[in-house]
Image (tube, rainbow, N blue to C red):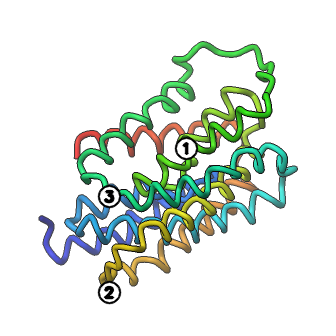
Amino acid sequence: MWGEESIYLLFILMPFASFLYASVGHGGASSYLMFLAIFGFAPEEIRPTALILNMMVSLVAFLNYRKVTVFPLTLFLSLIVFSVPAAYFGGKILLDADIYKKILGVLLLFPVLKFAGIFPVSSGEKINRSWWMGPILGLIIGFVSGLIGIGGGIILSPIILMLGWANVKETAALSALFIFLNSVAGFFGANSLQVEISPELWMLMPLTVIGGILGAYFGAQKFSPKTLKYVLAFVLLFASVKLILS
């Protein structure tokens, strides 16, 4: 258990995490879960706090990326149609904290391997998308997202990029809105617990959102697609190791 003075480290770590995640169109829930668990907050407080932050940061990321790319609306609709209700029902299920953090940590390793170039490099040709692929993918990711308290972008983004369904910035815009809606659904699903959030966590939220605003701006306006891939790989690897070892 960390002392009270150490808690102030969160005022640096949380905005930094939101900056990195928002720069690639993510909300950052996995890092919020990790940091809050390390600093001894109750699991019942952690999930709703992470989802609230996820909503705000991912919405800011979407608004920034929407300005600089063509939004893949058809692909998005096929993914979200079953994802939101699945996230809601997943949010109503309370997993043991150790189990869901380790599941998330393992899942994060797959996109890290992809962006590190360990997986075979594709020819650049996209895999044809049948009508049922998006809804099934959205259903699975949405349920897992609600179950473990994230928005699902860390799972969705590498899959879309590997399949060639969208480029990096299109994927960032799509993932950000996907995360926002799934986070809202997961939050309302988990809200049946009716747990009060600590004042310290409410104090953390404004700085964390500011970090997300800056990250979303630099990710959409300043960073190159290649840079985005490296940033994403770093963020996912960092979160994966911490979650598995926690």
Percent of width and height locating residue 131 = 79, 33
Identify the residue at horizontal 48%, vertical 76% (top origin): 207
The image shows residue 121, relative to residue 73, as above or below, that is above
Question: What's the mark number on residue 122?
Answer: none
Identify the residue at horizontal 68%, vertical 58% (top origin): 177
| Tag 1 residue | 141
Q: Nearer the viewer, residue 130 or 127?
A: 130
Determine the secondary structure under disc 2.
helix
Q: Nearer the viewer, residue 145 or 2?
A: 145
- Do the residues under discs 2 and 1 have CB atoms within 8 angstroms? no
Q: The residue under label 1 is which amino acid type?
A: Ile
- Label 2 and label 1: CA atoms lie apart by 32 Å
Determine the secondary structure under disc 1.
helix
The tag earlier along the polypeptide, 2 or 1, is 1
Percent of width and height locating residue 42 = 23, 68
Q: The residue under label 2 is which amino acid type?
A: Pro
Q: Quadrant of residue 115?
A: top right
Q: Nearer the viewer, mark 3 or mark 1?
A: 3
The tag earlier along the polypeptide, 3 or 2, is 3
Q: The residue under label 3 is which amino acid type?
A: Leu
| Tag 2 residue | 199
The image shows residue 57, relative to residue 127, as above or below, that is below
Q: Nearer the viewer, residue 118 or 27?
A: 27
Q: Is residue 175 left or right of residue 101?
A: right
Q: Residues within 10 Å of mark 2 (few under 14, many from 20)?
A: few
| Tag 3 residue | 94
Q: Is residue 6 left or right of residue 212?
A: left
Q: Residues within 10 Å of mark 3 (few under 14, many from 20)?
A: some
